[in-house]
Image (spheres, rainbow, N blue to C red):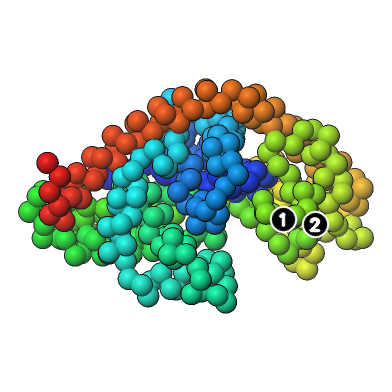
Amino acid sequence: MNEFQPLVFSGVQPTGNLHLGNYLGAIRKFVALQETNNCIYCVVDLHSLTAQLVHDDLEGQTRSITAAFLASGIDPKKHIVFNQARVLQHAELAWIFNCVARIGWMNRMTQFKDKAGKDRENASLGLLAYPSLMAADILVYRATHVPVGDDQKQHLELTRDIAQKFNNDFSDRIAELGLGVEMMMGEEKVNGFFPITEPIIGGPAARIMSLRDGSKKMSKSDPSDLSRINLTDDADTISKKIKKAKTDPEALPSETDGLASRPEAENLVGIYAGLAEISKQDVLNEFGGQQFSVFKPALADLAVEKLAPIAGEMRRLIADPAYIDSVLRDGGDRARMLAEGTMKSVRQIIGLLDN
């Protein structure tokens, strides 16, 4: 019996400028994963419609995210980089998964509750079904691993539930067609068509907070540009934002326990740890007992060293939209071939005639 070949999939929405939190929490992880895995990285432009149906410049935002991927070191020749709308099989599988998933599952999604707010009846159907499309994004390539942040873990759990229900509902048909793949479910070996995708979580800087309020996540939508470091910021802007970042009057502690009630201090230490790829305790071993007047310049220098080259390359790439489009076109062609292979089997399993 065949086994699933390891494959990493992840996507980023083209909504606003990417910032330091996106880089440390996701994109740098993408770059590291490509060294030892086959990877597919997608600009999920269809997902962006759930947050904002009418965009001023969706094409430009899509190119900007792609530029960030490339400038950070993702190799579009060895791996696949594309935008979701080029591969219609995502939407086709999402509709099938809408028929597999249960309304109760969708209603339990905390992101839907948060984004819909009190006026749930006025929320779009797309917002409710967002996790079904995310499941299709992953499973149309039968991806085995997905790097996710804390805010997406529940959606990946739903992806696993959808895959398992599909495998169970069509188990006889999958076996009849010889399309089953052996996998482990707990301690039991089972056969199914879709993998039970595993999350990739963690790292020293998986969650970066606002530079103006350590209790809030760094966000593209924050009205204050000083709250975040954009990946397109130049060296002077990066330094200025770090020097203006909110802190408290105390010196840095020597142990990480001392950061517990100091969100701004913990955030800046976490940013340093993420950029240097060391632990927070390692940072405090070097700077514990020092005032922020010493720590902030060191952090600014490190941030400029790591981020300014990416910003410069992003600006160069964005000025060449034809090249970015060629990358997306090539990636879309390669992704479409893989996705159509999956969908031909799905149509057979369900009994849809497509020839």
Query: Is 20 placed above or below 202 here?
Result: above
Query: Is 7 placed above or below 126 here?
Result: above
Residue carrying label 2: 212
Rendered image: mark on residue 355:
none
Residue carrying label 1: 222
Q: Is residue 101 left or right of residue 52?
A: left
Q: Is residue 169 visible?
A: yes
Picture coordinates of residue 190, whole percent (x, y): 20, 59
Q: Quadrant of residue 320?
A: top right
Q: Is residue 273 left or right of residue 117?
A: right
Q: Look at 48% across and 75% down and name the residue there.
A: 121
Q: Secondary structure at mark 2?
A: loop
Inspect the image, locate mark 2, and give the three-letter code of the amino acid beneath it: Arg
How packed mark 2 is, by other alpha carbons closer than 10 Å (few <14, some 14-19, many 20 or more), is some
Q: Quadrant of residue 198?
A: bottom left
Picture coordinates of residue 203, whole percent (x, y): 59, 50
Q: Look at 76% across and 61% down and name the residue there.
A: 214
Picture coordinates of residue 118, whole percent (x, y): 57, 77
Q: Nearer the viewer, mark 2 or mark 1?
A: 1
Q: Look at 47% across and 64% down and name the residue there.
A: 124
Q: Are marks 2 and 1 in contact (CB under 8 Å)?
A: yes
Lower sequence index among marks 2 and 1: 2
Location of the C terminus by quadrant is top left
Distance CA(mark 2)–CA(mark 1): 10 Å
Q: Secondary structure at mark 1?
A: loop
Q: Nearer the viewer, residue 292 or 328?
A: 328
Judged from this view, the residue extending furthest toward the left is 176
